Image (spheres, rainbow, N blue to C red):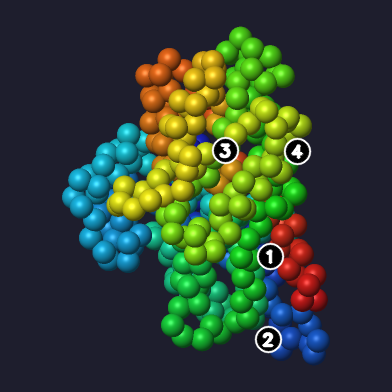
């Protein structure tokens, strides 16, 4: 067994594909009227395991379109600073927790790296599942993420199972509670370090990944859904409207206009209002990966420090049991709809 670099129960979900849930053998001839043999498929972006894999990873991201060498090198540099991205580890752990909660098999597929979505679909087909409930680990719906995940699942050939694809779950109540739990704990700690009080000395910036502006002008619901998630988290956390604002992070480096305001612009705006510290709560990401570990923990923190500001963030949901409960509630709702 390969030891987990995150210290998760002493064994690595990435390397060993651990699954604590072992389904009971299905009867060779199901009884008439028996429920369809169902599995769950969690879908995520994917992430290279080390900096050397970045060029190959980026070719999957762009569909083979070459990127300028300086862009590839910058992204490789970012991964070298964080060591590795734990996205696969956390997603596989989330899948294992969900399978135990539901008592259903849960597969994981990544669009741009191992374990690939196509491999997960083949494994599901080989085990003769009749129905698959697919959930994107990106709660807000955008054709740049959710739309591409759906295309990767369906492929060019007819699927040998019925696909129940969850397009969006940005307003799932338990998801908001999960984010709010980490927000309150982290904000209280940050305010104590800052010398303020829980009443809101540190302004909160909710963030989600930016997308190209043309995506929104063409009718994509992503921007509105991201802000709605933030509003629900703020409500669940008991925040007043004046305590928080919203920004989009991780704008692309390949040119064109991306939606904002950026986190950097928002930090400067808060500085101009007299604030000397900020607290960031991402609501578009469900676990640690490069957009959190580099963009927030390194780049935004250094940017804030250069402006005479301090920066804290909420812990990512990662192995949150409340996140597991949110996913389980989502899947059970789909099962009930088709019972």
Whichever of labels 2 and 1 marks the residue nearer the N terminus, that label is: 2
Q: Secondary structure at mark 2?
A: loop
Q: CA distance from mark 2 to mark 1?
A: 18 Å
> In the visual, does 256 lie left or right of 235?
left
Whole-percent x, y for residue 259 in the image = 46, 48
Whichever of labels 4 and 1 marks the residue nearer the N terminus, that label is: 1
* Residue found 69% across the figure and 42% down from its top: 231
Counting other residues with Cα less than 10 Å from the Cα at mark 1, is it few (<14), some (14-19), or many (20 or more)? some
Task: Give the residue number, with chain letter if any, for mark 1.
Answer: 104
Question: Which quadrant would residue 165 be assigned to in this image?
Answer: bottom right
Task: Give the residue number, with chain letter if any, for mark 3.
Answer: 246
Counting other residues with Cα less than 10 Å from the Cα at mark 2, is it few (<14), some (14-19), or many (20 or more)? few
Image position of 140 with respect to 244: above or below: below
Counting other residues with Cα less than 10 Å from the Cα at mark 3, is it few (<14), some (14-19), or many (20 or more)? many
Q: Which mark is residue 232?
A: none
Which of 181 and 217 lies nearest the eye of the viewer?
A: 217
Whichever of labels 2 and 3 marks the residue nearer the N terminus, that label is: 2
Question: Which quadrant would residue 262 be assigned to in this image?
Answer: top left
Task: Give the residue number, with chain letter if any, for mark 4.
Answer: 236
Task: Give the residue number, with chain letter if any, for mark 2.
Answer: 28
């Amino acid at each position: 067994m390969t030891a987990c670099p995150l210290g998760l129960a002493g064994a690595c979900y990435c390397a060993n594909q651990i699954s604590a849930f072992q389904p009971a053998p299905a009867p060779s001839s199901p009884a008439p009227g028996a429920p369809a043999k169902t599995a769950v498929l969690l879908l995520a972006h994917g992430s290279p395991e080390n900096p050397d894999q970045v060029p190959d990873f980026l070719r999957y991201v762009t569909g083979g379109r070459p990127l300028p060498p300086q862009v590839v090198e910058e992204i490789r540099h970012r991964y070298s600073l964080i060591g590795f991205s734990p996205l696969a580890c956390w997603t596989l752990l989330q899948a294992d927790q969900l399978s135990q909660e539901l008592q259903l098999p849960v597969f994981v597929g990544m669009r741009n790296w191992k374990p690939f979505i196509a491999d997960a679909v083949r494994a599901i087909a080989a085990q003769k599942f009749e129905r698959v409930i697919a959930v994107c680990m990106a709660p807000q719906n955008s054709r740049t993420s959710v739309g591409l995940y759906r295309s990767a699942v369906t492929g060019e050939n007819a699927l040998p199972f019925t696909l129940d694809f969850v397009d969006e779950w940005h307003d799932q109540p338990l998801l908001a509670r999960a984010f709010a739990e980490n927000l309150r704990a982290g904000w209280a700690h940050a305010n104590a370090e800052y010398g303020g009080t829980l009443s809101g000395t540190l302004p909160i910036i909710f963030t989600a990944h930016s997308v190209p502006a043309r995506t929104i002008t063409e009718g994509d619901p992503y921007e509105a859904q991201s802000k709605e998630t933030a509003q629900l988290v703020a409500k669940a956390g008991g925040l007043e409207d004046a305590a928080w604002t919203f920004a989009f992070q991780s704008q692309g480096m390949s040119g064109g206009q991306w939606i904002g305001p950026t986190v950097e612009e928002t930090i400067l705006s808060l500085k101009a209002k007299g604030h000397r510290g900020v607290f960031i709560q991402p609501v578009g990401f469900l676990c640690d990966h490069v957009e959190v570990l580099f963009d927030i923990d390194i780049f935004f923190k250094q940017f804030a420090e250069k402006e005479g500001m301090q920066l804290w963030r909420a812990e990512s949901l990662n192995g949150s049991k409340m996140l597991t409960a949110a996913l389980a509630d989502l899947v059970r709702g789909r099962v009930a709809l088709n019972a």
